[in-house]
Image (cartoon, grey):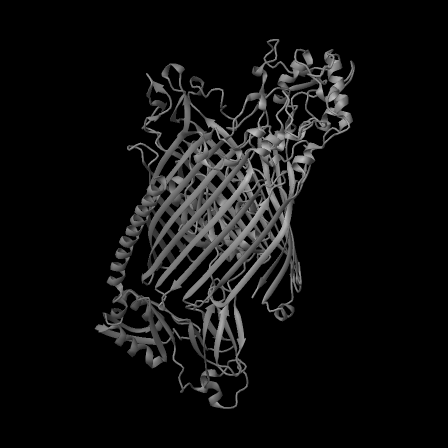
């Protein structure tokens, strides 16, 4: 029944989605039909104009205004100073141009209805006198001067014809531009040098020889300032962009052996703190852009894949992007949806940070926007690529622990300090267990080697009109834990692009499918490294050994988590050029993700003393999302500037549903995988959640002379997460930039090659809260008078409104020595208000809290510096470097009335919102060996009231990268650094109890008069020393500098010479070795990885817990990449 319902439901949704598409297409078809005949009528329109004795340039300018057309021409080809006169009364434009231009040897062609391209007619009567005074090659006959050279110019990247490319014969008056088909014709002879130039592409020269029909392919400019960056609903370049955008391309991603593409970002993006939750397959990567701006709502950025916003799987407040927001999870803490996206599919990632860049996304842009662009097919010969790699993963460092002898001595000393005689109950490690059989538990549970195998195959190609790319990949990855735990992922993607022959219609289509099977323990076993060294895991009968003092760690490994995830993402875009300068476009997106999870717990791995029974958990979580976004774009030259306007709308609908069912009383552990075999089935819940989102948006950009830029954006959003009276919000921004290096005064500075000053201010919003919180919610748990009952869960609040963030930024961008040195310095200040947070309620109300808007103001400010240099670029050598550093600050600026709320102890005005209070540790009492703390309030007792606000947060973080190539060899390496404050040690109970400790506890106090910073060992409750440890881990003895430096990635590659590759039947071949998370340097050697365990940030950026989790592992892959 459930399956039939789902099939029916899916069918209805597909039909509804198809109807929406059909409606949009019919609308666009009507618009197209209304304009197809316009081009034919341009030349037939009547024009009345009277001008006498003016230059041809002025005459054309007048005609542009009267006929509402635009002439495109090359001033090097056409003499614009010759005098003309025109007298016309409603004469057809075509006839008027024939009479005006043909006598001067000029032809014209109409493109895009409004655009008329002028070019020189290759005349046979050109006088040799016209060539006098020019530096031409020697000529012998007149016929040699009249030879026509023709050809076509295309983009080397896409294969599409380039319109308006300037073609000139060096040292001659001859020149032309390519027409609407990318074709050209120019008068030249053998020995002439033709120069091809086009904005955004590298210049190209060719010497005229015997071949007079040329095929020219221009490469996109590789200059960093001209690199295309993706922005909201469009593209720009670093040179002219008014917003703050940081990017990483496939060239950098492909050099890192990561399974989740977001794991390639840490340390590389100024203003973004990025960390992986743990080192298990499928784990999430958290991104926080320019600080935390919300007290308790979500801080997840908006992700957009190929122009389609990606909906978070929001199961609570704050929001989460884990797939298992409903249901169960494994040791990885949840499956990240981005682990289902193949890094090999990604072309680039652009991160939008300031208001100018993010406000066009309105309510979802407060936490920044991450734009992910996948690879597209390129025109040219069909190409087949294979990239195969294999390698391993391992822990990159271990905690130094006490050896068995040191451990036994510490235990013995503890009992002596406590005045207690060890016995078989409190000291089985000293009196019962075999001391000759010891185990290094850290190596046993975390010292394994994970195996990784990855293969990617890509087929791509096409022509100027149709291009395709198909990729299929398969990756297997095992864990370092004992046992057969692994993840297997299959991914595939098909991208298609098609242009009509007249270049007016463009259709793009992309579909990706992925499937992942994961087998993990239900929980992480990284904390069990502190077991007693002689602890037996099995009893004399070969069964799991149990004791009242501990849980057998093999029990954790015996409780398995199985997940089966499928993900389908489809999107399409249709773009039509209605007339010159005006385009309409619509994006359609559909996503469906299904996560089937099982937690299997056999009774044989549980302590028999508790009379356990086998049980299983079955959870299924499905999310479906569709979105339609029609847009219109208009471009027009006004004066000496260019106006670009974009307007559009967005309709999005997301449905998440899931169930959580428990099965127990199984007759056999072999049947745990089957729900129907359970003797008792309990349905814990079955949830269906809908989220709807609508928006109208627009942007206007003006570029004047390529020096002055202004940008304005506006968006009106509606979200179903708010009450009917508060669902809509307005957001917008203004941005401006001045490229002062184009001014005369700057051109006199010899070392300055580029300079730009930009600023922006605007508002964005945040709706990352649970659904339906404006309604009263009930649960069906419990009974009343033996009848099913419904219990209230939350108190509704229909007045909840949007959180709002006001963003300000000013930045300076500089280039020196022909852009060999590029520097960007940003200052930002973001203020978030109208905070959505839970307000505690008195118990008399029957509710714990209510979600409300609180009058709190959070400020995130900081400085960002980004530097890239080209150190060497000569001959066979090339060396480039990158460096970035961010200096962030976060604080609660104001919270009126906080002293009268239940939040008075949770936040402090003037402090970071994630502040931490600790006791001040004074060291060890030399007489007793007890820990001592400062009595700050002087009341004679040490309590939590004596805590002070400790240093917290990250004063600065960033990264340093280098890329060096010599001939066919290339070396890349990248360091990430993070200066931060947090937990510096872990206390495994008290030193002297039935737990091993790290080597810091070799310095424990042993006798009266000892001067040390570590209190005495103790094993039994009741002593003064034992009690003094109550505050030890809550003091600054465990808090301080938690900074680290990581060799985040390194790669070495060798490109096989093309002649050798050709012999092997390949066009290219590349051999490589790649490494990730290779080494970590930090002061606190007693934590596996400060990146994942230090308090003071959102999940993944310091979890706030002192528990260890498996950190991101050192990964090394060996691979080969071949093209055929």
Residue 16, percent from left and from top: 29, 48
Residue 752, percent from left and from top: 57, 55
Relative to residue 360, is residue 23 drawn left or right? left
Residue 470, percent from left and from top: 47, 59
Asked whether 567 or 558 is in front, the reply is: 558
The residue lying at 40 percent from left, 43 percent from top is 359
In this rendering, the answer to whether 631 lies above or below 463 is: above
| Residue 973 is at least partly visible in this image | no
Number of numbered discs? 0
The residue lying at 39 percent from left, 36 percent from top is 767
Asked whether 646 or 489 is in front, the reply is: 489
| Residue 785 is at least partly visible in this image | yes
* Quadrant in which residue 900 is drawn: top left
User: Residue extending furthest top?
Assistant: 940
Residue 575, percent from left and from top: 35, 58
Relative to residue 467, is residue 652 drawn left or right? left
Relative to residue 773, is residue 376 drawn left or right? right
The residue lying at 27 percent from left, 65 percent from top is 36
Asked whether 547 or 371 is in front, the reply is: 547
Q: Quadrant of the C terminus?
A: bottom right
* Quadrant in which residue 146 is drawn: bottom left
* Quadrant in which residue 419 is drawn: top right
Q: Quadrant of the N terminus?
A: top left
User: Residue extending furthest bottom?
Assistant: 141
């Amino acid at each position: 029944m459930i399956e039939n319902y789902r099939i029916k439901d899916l069918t209805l949704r597909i039909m509804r989605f198809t109807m929406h598409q059909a409606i949009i297409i019919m609308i666009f078809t009507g618009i197209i039909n209304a304009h197809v005949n316009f081009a034919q009528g341009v030349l037939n329109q009547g024009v009345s104009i009277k001008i006498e004795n003016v230059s041809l340039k002025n005459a054309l300018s007048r005609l542009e205004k009267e006929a509402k057309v635009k002439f495109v021409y090359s001033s090097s080809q056409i003499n614009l100073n010759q005098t003309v006169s025109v007298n016309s009364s409603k004469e057809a434009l075509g006839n008027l141009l024939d009479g005006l231009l043909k006598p001067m040897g000029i032809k014209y062609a109409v493109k895009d209805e409004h655009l008329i391209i002028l070019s020189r007619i290759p005349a046979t009567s050109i006088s040799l006198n016209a060539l006098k005074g020019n530096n031409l090659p020697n000529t012998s006959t007149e016929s040699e001067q009249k030879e026509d050279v023709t050809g076509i110019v295309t983009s080397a990247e896409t294969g599409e014809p380039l319109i308006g490319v300037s073609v000139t014969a060096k040292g001659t008056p001859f020149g032309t531009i390519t027409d609407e088909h990318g074709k050209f014709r120019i008068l030249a002879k053998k020995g002439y040098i033709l120069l091809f130039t086009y904005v955004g592409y590298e210049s190209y020269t060719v010497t005229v020889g015997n071949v007079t029909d040329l095929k020219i392919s221009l490469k996109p400019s590789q200059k960093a300032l001209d690199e295309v960056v993706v922005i909201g609903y469009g593209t720009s370049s670093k040179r002219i962009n008014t917003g703050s955008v940081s990017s990483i391309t496939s060239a950098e991603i492909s050099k890192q052996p990561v399974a989740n593409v977001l794991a390639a970002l840490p340390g590389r993006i100024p203003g973004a703190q990025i960390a992986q939750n743990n080192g298990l397959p499928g784990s999430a990567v958290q991104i926080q852009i320019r600080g935390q701006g919300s007290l308790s709502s979500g801080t997840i950025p908006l992700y957009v894949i190929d122009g389609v916003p990606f909906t978070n799987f929001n199961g609570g407040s704050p929001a989460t992007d884990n797939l298992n927001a409903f249901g169960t999870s494994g040791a990885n803490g949840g499956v990240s949806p981005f682990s289902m996206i193949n890094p090999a599919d990604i072309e680039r990632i652009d991160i939008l940070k300031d208001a100018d860049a993010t406000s066009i996304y309105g309510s979802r842009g407060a936490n920044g926007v991450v734009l992910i662009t996948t690879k597209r097919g390129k025109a040219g010969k069909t190409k087949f690529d294979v990239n195969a790699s294999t390698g391993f993963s391992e822990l990159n460092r271990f905690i130094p622990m006490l050896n068995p002898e040191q451990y036994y001595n510490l235990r013995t000393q503890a009992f002596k300090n406590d005045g207690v005689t060890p016995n078989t109950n409190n000291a089985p490690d000293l009196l019962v267990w075999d001391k000759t059989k010891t185990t290094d538990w850290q190596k046993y549970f975390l010292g394994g080697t994970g195996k990784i195998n990855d293969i990617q195959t890509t087929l791509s190609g096409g022509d100027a009109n149709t291009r395709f790319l198909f990729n299929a990949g398969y990756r297997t990855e095992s864990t370092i834990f004992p046992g057969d735990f692994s993840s297997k992922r299959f991914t595939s993607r098909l991208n298609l692009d098609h242009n009509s022959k007249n270049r007016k219609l463009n259709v793009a289509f992309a579909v990706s499918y992925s499937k992942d099977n994961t087998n993990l323990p239900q929980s992480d076993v990284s904390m069990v490294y502190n077991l007693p060294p002689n602890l037996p895991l099995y009893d004399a009968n070969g069964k799991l050994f149990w004791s009242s003092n501990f849980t057998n760690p093999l029990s954790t490994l015996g409780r398995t988590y199985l997940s089966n995830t499928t993900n389908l993402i489809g999107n399409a875009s249709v773009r039509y050029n209605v007339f010159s300068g005006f385009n309409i476009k619509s994006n359609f997106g559909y996503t469906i993700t299904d996560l089937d999870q099982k937690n299997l717990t056999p009774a044989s791995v549980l302590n028999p003393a508790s009379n356990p029974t086998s049980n299983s958990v079955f959870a299924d979580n499905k999310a479906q999302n569709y979105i339609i976004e029609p847009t219109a774009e208009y471009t027009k030259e006004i004066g000496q500037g260019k106006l670009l306007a974009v307007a559009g709308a967005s309709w999005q609908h997301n449905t998440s549903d899931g169930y959580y069912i428990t099965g127990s009383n199984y007759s056999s552990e072999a049947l745990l995988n089957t729900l129907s075999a359970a003797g008792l089935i309990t349905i814990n819940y079955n949830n269906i959640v809908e989220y709807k989102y609508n928006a109208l948006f627009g942007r206007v950009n003006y570029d004047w002379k390529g020096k002055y830029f202004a940008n304005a954006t506006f968006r009106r959003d509606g979200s179903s997460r708010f009450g009917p009276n508060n669902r809509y919000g307005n957001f917008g921004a203004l941005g401006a930039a001045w490229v002062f290096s184009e001014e005369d005064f700057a051109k006199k500075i010899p070392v300055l090659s580029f300079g730009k000053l930009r600023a922006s201010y605007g508002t964005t919003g945040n709706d990352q809260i649970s659904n339906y919180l404006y309604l009263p919610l009930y649960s069906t748990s419990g009974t009343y008078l033996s009848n099913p009952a419904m219990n209230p869960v939350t108190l509704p609040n229909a007045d909840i409104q949007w959180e709002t963030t006001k963003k300000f930024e000013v930045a300076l961008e500089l280039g020196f020595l022909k852009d060999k040195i590029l520097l960007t310095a940003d200052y930002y200040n973001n203020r978030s208000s109208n905070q959505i947070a839970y307000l505690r309620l008195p118990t008399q109300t029957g509710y714990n809290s209510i979600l409300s808007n609180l009058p709190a103001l959070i400020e995130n400010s900081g400085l960002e510096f980004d530097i890239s240099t080209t150190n060497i670029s000569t001959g066979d050598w090339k060396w480039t470097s990158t460096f970035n550093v961010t200096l962030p600050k976060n604080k609660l600026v104001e919270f009126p009335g906080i002293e009268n709320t239940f939040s008075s102890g949770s936040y402090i005005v003037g402090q970071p919102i994630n502040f931490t209070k600790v006791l001040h540790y004074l060291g060890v009492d030399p007489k007793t060996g007890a820990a001592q703390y400062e009595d700050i309030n002087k009341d004679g007792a040490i309590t939590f009231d004596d805590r002070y606000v400790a240093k917290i947060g990250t004063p600065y973080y960033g990264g340093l990268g280098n890329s060096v190539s010599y001939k066919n060899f290339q070396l890349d390496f990248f360091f990430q650094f993070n200066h931060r404050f947090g937990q510096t040690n872990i206390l495994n109970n008290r030193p002297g109890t039935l737990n091993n400790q790290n080597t810091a506890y070799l310095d424990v106090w042993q006798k009266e008069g000892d001067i040390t910073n570590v209190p005495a060992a103790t094993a039994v409750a009741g002593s003064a020393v034992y009690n003094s440890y109550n505050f030890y881990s809550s003091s600054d003895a465990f808090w301080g500098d938690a900074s680290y430096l990581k060799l985040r990635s390194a790669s070495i590659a060798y490109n096989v010479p093309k002649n050798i590759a050709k012999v092997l039947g390949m066009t290219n071949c590349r051999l490589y070795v790649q490494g990730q998370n290779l080494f970590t340097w930090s002061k606190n050697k007693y934590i596996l990885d400060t990146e994942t365990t230090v308090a003071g940030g959102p999940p993944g950026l310091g979890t706030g817990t002192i528990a260890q989790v498996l950190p991101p592992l050192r990964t090394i892959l060996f691979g080969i990449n071949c093209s055929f």
